[in-house]
Image: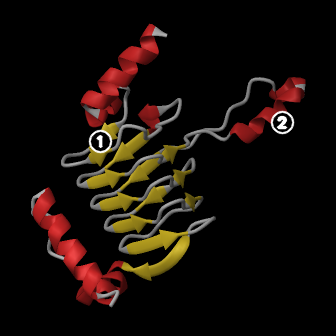
Amino acid sequence: MIREFIKKIRLKKSPVEYWREEGAVIGNNCEIYQNVSFGSEPYLVEIGNHVRINSGVQFVTHDGGVWVLRLSEKYKNIDLFGKIVIGNNVHIGTNAIILPGVTIGNNCIIGCGAIVTKNVFENSVVAGVPARKIESIEEYFFKHKSDFDYTKHMNYSKKKEYLIEKYDKNTD
């Protein structure tokens, strides 16, 4: 119980540092939300630079299905693991699940709730269950280019005012 309490405090203070101390390789300029799960083998997860991992994301580094095979005396001690590698400049959306052995290339977006069962090529946007490519990063950019709001560095009040005005106008 005390161990879990200490873990929560460490995760709240700095999720990136916590997971590094647990063995995950994490690059620079990464943002990892507190309730991300690196599973029981965080040392099998490698993350590049400038990666954001949203709430509820799960990295699954082992295949629990071998449980069924362990009934046999011959296989009673087997496990099945796979390293997960995330490239640079990647966004992983809320509640996505990344399965063992998956590599996600550079410049990718993983949609919310996606279950990534296979490698994701660089410059891709993937979503769904199982995750599949829906467009390239370039297509994503051009599709949304006219919708972008330049609010990233606005303070809370100014951003709120801007968004309320924008969306109140669009509902008339």
Task: Give the CA distance from mark 1 to mark 2.
Answer: 33 Å
Residue drawn at (30%, 23%) of the image: 10
Which element type, helix, strand or loop, lies under badge 1? strand
Q: Is residue 6 above or below residue 13?
A: above
Q: How is the image coloured?
A: secondary structure
Q: Are marks 1 and 2 in contact (CB under 8 Å)?
A: no
Which label number is shown at residue 26?
A: 1
The one nearer the camera, 87 or 125, is 125
Placement of the C terminus among the 4 image quadrants:
bottom left
Q: As shown in the figure, which amino acid type bears the numbered disc 1? A: Ile
- Relative to residue 10, is residue 91 depicted above or below? below
Q: Secondary structure at mark 2?
A: helix
Spot occupied by residue 86 in the image (x, y as percentages of width and height)? 38, 53
Q: Residue furthest top?
A: 2
Residue at the spot 51% in from the left edge and 76% down from the top edge: 133
Q: Residue at x 32, y 38 (%)?
A: 25
Question: Is residue 131 positioned above or below 54 on the image?
Answer: below
Classed neighbour count for the residue bearing mark 2: other residues with Cα under 10 Å, few (<14), some (14–19), many (≥20): few
Position of residue 37 measured from the top left corner of the image (x, y, whole percent): 47, 38
Q: Residue at x 19, y 65 (%)?
A: 160
User: Would residue 39 be visible to someone looking at this image?
Assistant: yes
Residue furthest to the right = 72
Q: Which mark is residue 68?
A: 2
Q: Amino acid at mark 2?
A: Val
Q: Within the image, what quadrant is residue 70 found in?
A: top right
